[in-house]
Structures are given as C-alpha cells and as structure tokens.
C-alpha cells in the first residue's frame, strides 16, 4: 500500500489538501465538495473516511469512477460546540480495478490521500452609526463580512501535559511509599535493638 499526500499520476483532487467549511452561527451546517478526477483508462474505486464521523456526513461507501472521468463528493459539516477546534482529518482511498476484479482495500495498489478540514469563521462588522461623520472614502452602509480562519488546538500539547501530570502523581506516590517504608524499617529496627539490649542485660 502506497501513501500519497496529494495527487498521483492516476488521480487528481480538487481541492488538493484542505476542505473548507464556513462557521456561521446562523446556519447549523456547512458543505464542501471534493472532486476526484481519474486519469486511468480503467475503472477506479474510491472511498472516503473521516476522523470525526459524527461531525461530517458524506457517502462513505465504495464509489465507482469510470475511466478518465470525474466524480464529486459532497461533505456536510454539522456544527457542534468546539468540534471545529479539533484537527479533523479525512482519508481518501483509491484503487484501479480491471474487469471482474474484486476490491481489496488491504491489498497492493491502494493509494491513500490525506485531507484536512479548514474552518473559516464568518464575522460581520456592524453598520456605522449614521450620526457619526465618517472620513472619506465613505464606508458602505451594508454590513461588511470578514472571514477569519480558525486554527485548531494542538492535541499533542494537551496529551503531553496529561502524561506529565500522571508521571508527577506516580513520583509523589512512590516517594510517599519509600518514606513510609523507611520510617517503618527504622521503628522496627529500634524495637529489635531495644529487645536485644534488654535480653543481654
């Protein structure tokens, strides 16, 4: 199985890497279209997977692309709180098959393409107060729409912090155990020494 990040001699993607979704609080969903073009003279089978299947809706079954043709997959993002702050990934698998050949996604000849979700926040600048004199050139009366890219949080730092906390807890517990063991050994040794002294006396 070969792993390819972008295009190959047999397949081209549009967009090649990032699927854009617009976050608009007025709408519960946002859609993006992935177009897959086959340059092969044989039939191509493809399927799409997501790291967040509960947040995205699309056709995840095997899709047939005729020779030297294109197909489009519509991907719908369902807006949920903070889901766009994660790193959402997609995996597209393609396989060129010949007549009467079975599809084996674990066999040789499977090409994989990594894609990522890019979220764009739609913000609106309120209309200027008509009572306030605006400098030239005059600002348009309608609201201005500004699109800002949302950067996902890095899960690596959070995981590292969690592991560090666990190690600290383990170290503290081990230190307490060693300290108690030392105290117990000292007390037991003192008692035995005292008994020996009494017996000798």
Image (tube, helix red, strand yellow):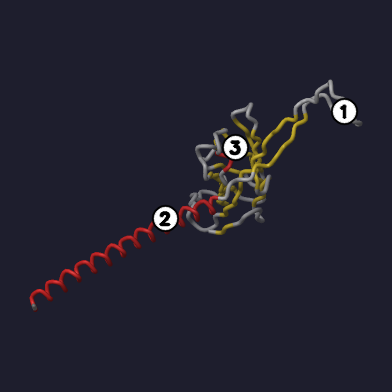
Give whichever of 84, 186 is nearer the camera: 186
Report the residue marked by disc 2. 166
Task: Give the structural element (helix, strand or loop) at label 3.
Answer: strand
The answer to whether 56 is drawn above or below residue 105 in the figure is: above
Determine which quarter of the picture holds residue 78: top right
> Toward the viewer: 12 or 39?
12
Q: Residue furthest front?
A: 201
Q: Is residue 179 left or right of residue 75?
A: left
Residue at numbered disc 3: 75
Identify the secondary structure beneath mark 1.
loop
Relative to 148, is 135 above or below? above
For image coordinates 55% across by 34% down, the residue present is: 80
Numbered mark located on residue 74 in the image: none
Q: Are marks 2 and 3 in contact (CB under 8 Å)?
A: no
Which residue is found at the position 72% from the left and 30% from the top? 124
| Circle 1 residue | 134
**Residue lying furthest right in this view?**
136
Between disc 2 and disc 3, whose residue precedes? 3
């Amino acid at each position: 199985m070969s792993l390819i990040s972008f295009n190959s001699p047999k397949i081209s993607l549009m967009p090649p890497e990032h699927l854009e979704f617009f976050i608009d609080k007025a709408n519960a969903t946002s859609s993006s279209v992935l177009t897959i073009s086959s340059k092969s003279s044989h039939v191509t089978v493809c399927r799409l997977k997501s790291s967040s299947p509960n947040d995205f809706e699309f056709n995840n079954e095997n899709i047939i692309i005729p020779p030297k043709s294109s197909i489009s997959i519509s991907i719908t993002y369902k807006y949920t709180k903070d889901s766009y702050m994660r790193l959402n990934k997609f995996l597209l698998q393609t396989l060129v098959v010949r007549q009467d050949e079975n599809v084996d996604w674990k066999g040789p000849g499977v090409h994989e393409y990594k894609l990522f979700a890019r979220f764009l926040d739609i913000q609106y600048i309120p209309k200027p107060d008509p009572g306030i004199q605006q400098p030239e050139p005059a600002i348009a009366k309608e609201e201005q729409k500004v699109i800002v890219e949302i950067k996902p949080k890095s899960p690596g730092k959070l995981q590292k912090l969690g592991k560090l906390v666990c190690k600290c807890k383990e170290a503290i517990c081990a230190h307490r155990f060693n300290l108690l063991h030392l105290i117990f050994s000292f007390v037991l040794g003192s008692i035995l020494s005292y008994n020996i002294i009494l017996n000798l006396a």
